[in-house]
Amino acid sequence: MTLLAIAAAPVIYLLFWFYHKDKFDKEPLRILFWAFLGGCISIFPAILFEGLWEHYGYTQQGSNLYLAFYAYIVVGLSEEISKFFFIRRIMKKSYVNEPYDGILYSVIVSLGFAFIENIFYVYESGSSVGIMRAFTAVPAHATFAAMMGYFLAKAKFNGNYMLNTLMGIVGAVALHGSYDYFLFINNVPLIKFGAILSLILGVWLTRKAIKIHNDSSPFRNI
């Protein structure tokens, strides 16, 4: 139970944080629960995609250029596309009625993914890994999702559907791949600097995206 609590704690904190940022038209908790459950399920197609890559010889070994491919495509693209299929269905619903909803639902799905992933890591490697991931990998997943949700909301409310959807996927994969790349390379100073810098950039972009979409809410002045 202790390990489960360690795995769940950062996810629960971020769920409440992003829900609190929904300032003008709160989403139903029942719908958010199903979005979170969908995110939990989304980890399994990601595992399948990554397994297929590894079956054909793409593993976490090789030159820095090879590791970049592994980080951005094998891991980043596989995981973000898996989340996207669930997020995309939600974005078509009528209850997604303001731009911030795109960020919120994307993050909820991603935190479901991060929750299951966190359980795997914590039960395999122990509480110290869970505590470290609470301040790194879990918030990183939220920032990847916020980037995707920002552009998916633009696709729904501002037009240019294909371009904004592509930007959302590319943006999430770029942040995800950059974060993972610095974890994969065999250079300790770069691991610390690059991964932390990627996370800081993701947090900054997330805060900026939240402000932009909340400022453009049709419910702002009601």
Image (cartoon, rainbow, N blue to C red):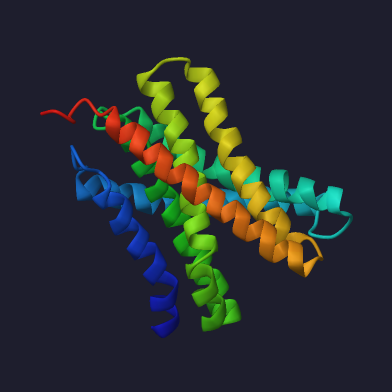
Residue 211 sits in quarter = top left
Q: Which quadrant does the N terminus fall into? A: bottom left
Is residue 167 or residue 84 the one in the foreground?
167
Is residue 197 or residue 117 the one in the foreground?
197
Left or right of residue 109: residue 216? left
Can you give x and y, in whole percent of width and height, for residue 97 in the image?
25, 28
Q: Which quadrant does the C terminus fall into? A: top left
Please name the residue shown 67% across and 49% down the image.
178
Can you give x and y, in whole percent of width and height, for residue 131 in the image?
50, 76
Is residue 32 or residue 99 the one in the foreground?
99
Left or right of residue 73: residue 20? left
Can you give x and y, in whole percent of width and height, for residue 219 in the image?
17, 29
Please name the residue shown 36% across and 52% down the image.
36
Disc count in the image? 0
Left or right of residue 13: residue 43? right
Please name the residue shown 68% across and 57% down the image.
194
Can you give x and y, in whole percent of width and height, for residue 172 in the image?
56, 41
Please name the residue shown 54% across and 54% down the image.
200
Q: Is residue 182 above or below residue 66?
A: below
Q: In this view, does 132 lie above or below 1?
A: above
Q: Residue furthest top?
A: 160
Q: Which residue lies furthest to the right in this view?
A: 63
Residue 41 visible in the shown view = no
Residue 130 visible in the shown view = yes
Left or right of residue 50: residue 204? left
Residue 26 sits in quarter = top left
